[in-house]
Amino acid sequence: MTVLLAQLSDPHITAGRGDRAPVHVLPGNHDDRDALRAHFPAGSHSARAGEPYRHTAMIGGELRLVVCASTIPGLPGGLLDRAWLEAQLAVGGDIPTIVAMHHPPLPIGMPALDEIGLPEDDRAALAALLRRHSAVRRVVAGHVHRCVSGVVGGCAVAICPSTYLAARLEVGAEDYALTPEPPAFLVHALLDGELVTHVQPVH
């Protein structure tokens, strides 16, 4: 999942006119981290090959992005670094914040995908953390190849669809199948202090 952090009022960013917004790379469980470092050296958050991707936090305009690398190399499931995330949110003040991670922080009703998400105790810990930090306006994730929304700890969650193949919606199914539904990505915009999320299909 690639997270773009921009502010619509930023005079240096004009969407659709060839200007470049900063790119922050968040690896998924299928990604080759060394290849990502080679192609995105400025956004890899790790200097040497073989090192794990580091978490990072940054501010762009009036919006803060906190990136949590939830992947475990070689495994489909994820883990949340609770202590690191809590420390980051504790120093962010009231700045509107997006918390990004690869693995969704809530079950989506498809057991085969829920089993390779975040553990239940991590999800519960995140919910408690979000209740204490109202500056977090959105948690964004990917992993499940579907566009899904929900709420965790009173905070809106937006799960990004795939830019390639989607997982067919079969609630309660013990397995899942990929299907060539239209790919899409999410666009998050801070408008008058409120965060809105758009689903943008890829034509």
Image (tube, rainbow, N blue to C red):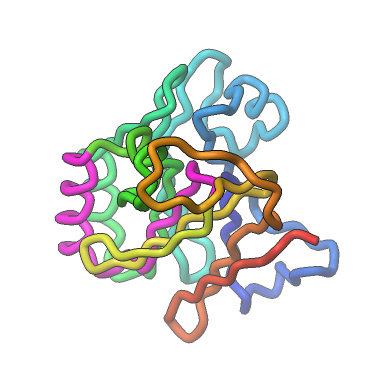
Q: Quadrant of residue 127?
A: bottom left
On the image, the x and y values in percent for residue 73 come to 45, 20
Q: Nearer the viewer, residue 88 or 116?
A: 116
Task: Give how far across and how far down residue 62 sits, in percent.
Answer: 47, 71
Q: Is residue 132 above or below residue 180?
A: below
Kindly identify the residue that appears in the image at 48 percent across and 86 percent down: 192
Q: Residue at x 80, y 69 (%)?
A: 16
Is residue 7 depicted above or below 193 in this figure?
Answer: above
Comparing 178 with 63, the one in front is 178
- In magenta stretch: residue 58: no
Answer left or right for 135 relative to 163.
Answer: left
What residue appears at the point 42 percent right and 30 percent down from the top-left corner?
Answer: 71
27 on left or right of 34: left
Q: What is the x, y in percent for residue 26? A: 53, 40
**Range of magenta residues:** 120-145
Q: Quadrant of residue 34?
A: top right
